[in-house]
Image (cartoon, rainbow, N blue to C red):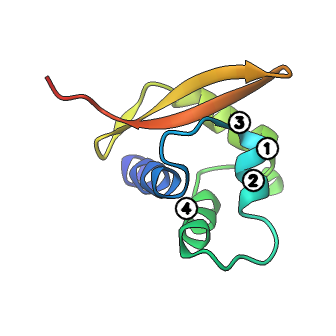
Amino acid sequence: PELETLTIFLKTWFGAFSTRAISASELITSVSGQLNDPKLIHLKKAIEDLPLSSSQQQSSKSVGRYLGHRKGRVAGGLVLEPGLKISDRQTWRVKRVEVI
């Protein structure tokens, strides 16, 4: 179930942002409020399905921690990589895995 959840999350992230690096805070902000974009609606559902503690569901801190623990993990042909730090905030990107 963990791999399946991660795969769905990475695929919906990639569908919404491609390889653009964003912070956990930007990720949460992008799926907040009234959503009309189907890609963001699917991404919000994928974030809600992440194994986060219920008290911290969808906080940027808990999502950032989740991302940090899964950097470099490959799921569904995609990999989560750290991007640059901007204003002391780590950014993250999802990229396709290069098959050799």
Image depth: mark 1 or mark 3 in front: 1
Where residue 74 appears, as percent x and y from the top left, is 35, 34
Q: Secondary structure at mark 2?
A: helix
Crowding around mark 3 (Cα neighbors within 10 Å: few <14, some 14 to 19, many 20+) is many
Crowding around mark 4 (Cα neighbors within 10 Å: few <14, some 14 to 19, many 20+) is some
Mark 2 or 3 closer to N-term? 2
Which quadrant is the C terminus positioned in?
A: top left
Distance, label 2 to label 4, CA atoms, is 12 Å
- Inspect this view and state whether residue 57 appears: no
Disc 2 residue type? Ile
Disc 4 residue type? Ala
Residue at numbered disc 4: 46
Mark 1 or 4 closer to N-term? 1
Disc 3 residue type? Gly
Q: Secondary structure at mark 3?
A: helix
Eyeballing the image, is 83 above or below 5? above
Crowding around mark 2 (Cα neighbors within 10 Å: few <14, some 14 to 19, many 20+) is some
Dot 2 and dot 1 residues touching (CB under 8 Å): yes
Residue at numbered disc 1: 25
Residue at numbered disc 2: 28
Q: Secondary structure at mark 4?
A: helix
Residue located at (70% from left, 49% from top): 27
Disc marking residue 64? 3
Residue located at (28% from left, 41% from top): 77
Where residue 29 appears, as percent x and y from the top left, is 79, 55
Eyeballing the image, is 82 above or below 59? above
Would residue 100 appear left or right of 53 to someone viewing this image? Answer: left
